[in-house]
């Protein structure tokens, strides 16, 4: 086994092998180590709440093989035009009243046009004025677009690497890994917080999962927000019959994200509806400290608000305040 860097090392440089070695630790040792790391940087029982809204649904030209919104797969999803501003404001008000701190707006685009970006900028401005943190995920950004979003007060841009560079080509052919890294660079240089993670359960190997984490952890700096999605299998997509990943492997991935990106907020993202309370509790123990909150993700289901309230009550968790995480 190669020596593991101390998780408190400031400099990045996690090799894939070092991350595979973390995966191979006994489960309890790994989760314990992640929880120790978690407590150095975060409030132990606080979980940040983000709500999602699909502002433009379906009909996407890309071929991401997990995605119900790709126009290439018949998933029975109805395609919608970009939502009007007042409908977005209504949804944000509801999310705020329910207790969300951040409002994330997603569009099924390869990349926004200048006109589409102008409409999103109006939405960001309005949601920000309501006192919510703002996040958007719009696909690839062209030069200058990130700066416009930043000027409108955008707090986070979500753009996932999804999987390892080696496995990526079997999942998406219409944009490259480098395209994604380039968009992340635009976001970073505009001074917007980076929200970047991936999906577990695409049929990748453990080494490929380690490859994803190594890419994320070695971004300089690593993302402020790291969504870990468990594949939601949607009928009609090429991945609808992919065998499930062992739930403990998912928890291990959360733990390793926590260890390798100690100050990031790690979000237990898509796939929560299929997890019972005990599995979610293990994910929180492993260092997850954010969830998508609200009955819907973009097009698929998420636990009901009442179920999440009951879960927080059972586990003694509290919603984190705005601006979370506070630097220790
Ligand atoms: N079109 C934009 C893009 O791809 O960047 C933004 C929206 S896209 C739906 C955002 C992310 O949702 C994807 O990168 C992927 O990680 C995640 N996602 C999409 N479908 C999913 C599924 N079925 N299960 C889990 N995660 C999924
Ligand atoms: C992320 O990593 N997960 C969210 C958000 N970023 C945009 C999206 C999950 C989508 C799940 C499938 C759907 O609901 O369409
Ligand atoms: Fe389009 Fe985004 Fe879905 Fe890919 S993940 S098909 S880019 S909406």
Image (spheres, rainbow, N blue to C red):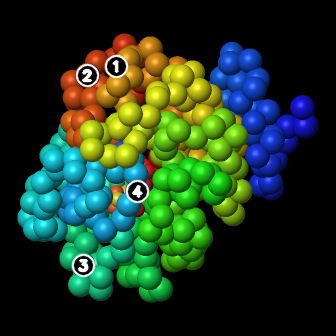
Mark 3 or 1: in front is: 3
Pick whichever, 113 or 290, lies toward us.
Answer: 113
Q: Find out if the beta carbon at label 1 lies less than 8 Å from the nearest ligand 2 atom.
A: no
Mark 1: few, some, or many residues within 10 Å (few <14, many ≥20)? some
Q: Quadrant of the N terminus?
A: top right
Q: Is residue 148 above or below residue 276?
A: below
Q: Secondary structure at mark 1?
A: helix
Q: Find out if the beta carbon at label 4 lies less than 8 Å from the nearest ligand 3 atom.
A: yes
Picture quadrant of residue 31: top right
Q: Which residue is mark 4?
A: 64
> How far apart, in angstroms, are the residues tagged by discs 3 and 1?
38 Å
Pick whichever, 323 or 294, lies toward us.
Answer: 294
Q: Secondary structure at mark 2?
A: helix
> How far apart, in angstroms, are the residues tagged by discs 1 and 2?
6 Å
Please give the label number shown on residue 311: 1
Disc nearer the start of the sequence (4/2): 4
Q: Which residue is mark 2?
A: 307
> How far apart, in angstroms, are the residues tagged by discs 4 and 3?
22 Å
């Amino acid at each position: 086994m190669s020596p593991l860097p101390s998780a408190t090392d400031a400099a990045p440089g996690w090799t894939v092998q070092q991350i595979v070695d973390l995966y191979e630790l006994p489960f309890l040792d790994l989760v314990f180590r992640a929880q120790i790391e978690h407590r150095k940087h975060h409030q132990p029982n606080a979980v940040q709440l983000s709500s999602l809204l699909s502002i433009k649904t379906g009909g996407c030209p890309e071929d991401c093989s997990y995605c119900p919104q790709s126009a290439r797969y018949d998933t029975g999803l109805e395609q919608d035009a970009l939502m009007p501003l007042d409908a977005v404001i209504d949804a944000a008000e509801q999310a705020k009243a329910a207790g969300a701190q951040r409002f994330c707006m997603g569009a099924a685009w390869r990349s926004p046009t200048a006109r589409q970006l102008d409409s999103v900028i109006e939405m960001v401005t309005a949601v920000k004025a309501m006192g919510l943190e703002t996040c958007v995920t719009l696909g690839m950004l062209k030069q200058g677009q990130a700066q416009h979003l930043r000027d409108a007060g955008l707090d986070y841009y979500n753009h996932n690497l999804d999987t390892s560079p080696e496995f990526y080509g079997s999942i998406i052919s219409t944009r490259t890994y480098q395209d994604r890294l380039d968009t992340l660079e635009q976001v970073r240089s505009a001074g917007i917080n980076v929200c970047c993670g991936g999906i577990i359960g695409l049929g990748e190997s453990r080494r490929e999962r380690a490859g994803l984490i190594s890419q994320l952890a070695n971004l300089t700096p690593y993302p402020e927000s790291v969504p870990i999605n468990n594949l939601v299998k949607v009928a009609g997509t090429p991945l609808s019959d992919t065998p499930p990943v062992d739930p403990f492997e998912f928890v291990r991935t959360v733990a390793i994200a926590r260890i390798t990106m100690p100050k990031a907020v790690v979000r237990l993202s898509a796939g929560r509806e299929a997890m019972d309370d005990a599995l979610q509790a293990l994910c929180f123990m492993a260092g997850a400290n954010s969830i998508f909150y609200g009955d819907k993700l973009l097009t698929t289901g998420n636990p009901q608000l009442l179920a999440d309230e009951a879960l927080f009550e059972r586990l003694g968790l509290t919603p984190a305040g705005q601006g979370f995480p506070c630097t220790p």
